[in-house]
Image (cartoon, rainbow, N blue to C red):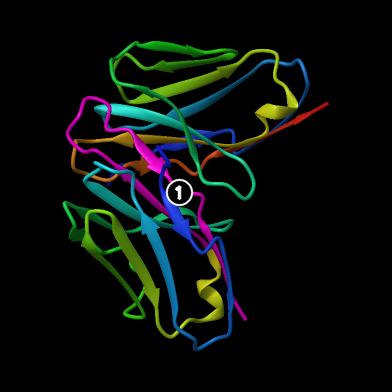
Amino acid sequence: DAGVIQSPRHEVTEMGQEVTLRCKPISGHNSLFWYRQTMMRGLELLIYFNNNVPIDDSGMPEDRFSAKMPNASFSTLKIQPSEPRDSAVYFCASRLAGGLYNEQFFGPGTRLTVL
Amino acid sequence: TQLLEQSPQFLSIQEGENLTVYCNSSSVFSSLQWYRQEPGEGPVLLVTVVTGGEVKKLKRLTFQFGDARKDSSLHITAAQPGDTGLYLCAGLDSGNTPLVFGKGTRLSVIA
C-alpha cells in the first residue's frame, strides 16, 4: 500500500496567490482529515470528511480556506488568497472508521511558505 | 471538550537511559493511539490500545492504557538516538469522530 499521498511536498508562494494542496487517501478508507501543524499551535484539525461528505469544518480558520472531496480517492485544500500567517505544514490523514482500532494514517505533509 | 495532556513537553536524555512519557485526560476514550513524528515527516502510527489495562510492546517501547481508559504511558528502555522525535498521543471517542491529539513530547536522545 502506498499510504496517504500528498502533493506538493513543498510550496513557496507570494501573498495573495491561490494555493491548492492535494491528497490521495489510502484505498478503502472512508474518513479523511486535513490538519495544520505549527510550532506555536501544534496539530490542528481543519476539516474532516466521512464518505466524501464534509462533516465538520469548524477548524477552518477563515473563508479563505476551502476543501473538497469529489470522490473517495481525492481531496483538495485551497487557500485563496494566501497570507504569510498561513505558512505551516499541512497534513492529510485517512482511516477506515467503524472498526475496532480505527487506526489513522498520515501523509508526509506539504510545507507551505507564504512570502 | 475532551483534552489530552502530555508530559513532559520536552525531554533530553543520554543514550542508554530509560524514560516514560505520559498522556492524561479526564475523559474516557474507546482507544488511544501513539505516534512518532520525525522532522520533515508526518506522524507515524506506533500502536493502538483499546482495552483498559492493556500493555503492548514494540521492541524497546512499552505502551500501557490505563484501567479506566483515561490515560496512557509510553516507556522507552535504553533510548537510542533513533528514538529522537515528537511523540503524540491521540484518543478516540467513537468510530466516526476525529482523534483528540495531545500537544506532544519532544524527545532528544544524545549519543
Q: Taking A18 as reference, is B30 above or below it?
A: above
Q: Position of residue A94 (x, y in %)?
A: 32, 45
Q: Residue at x 68, y 33 (%)?
A: B84
Quadrant where the N terminus of chain A sits is: top left
All told, the count of numbered labels is 1
In this rendering, is residue A21 above or below B5?
A: below
On screen, residue B25 above or below B103:
above
Up-down relation of residue A56 to residue A86 (above or below): above
Q: Residue at x 48, y 81 (%)?
A: A82
Relative to B18, is A98 on the left or the right?
left
Q: Residue furthest right?
A: B111
Q: Residues within 10 Å of mark 1 (few under 14, many from 20)?
A: many
Give B67 or B43, whichever is nearer the viewer.
B43
| Left or right: residue A76 compared with residue B40 | left
Was residue A94 drawn as part of the magenta stretch in this picture?
Answer: yes
Chain letter of disc 1? A
Residue A56 lies in quadrant: bottom left
- The segment highlighted magenta reads A89-115
Label 1 amino acid? Gly
Residue A79 pos. (x, y %): 41, 77
Q: Residue at x 27, y 47 (%)?
A: B1
Is B69 displayed left or right of B47 in the figure?
A: left
Q: Which residue is under mark 1? A: A107
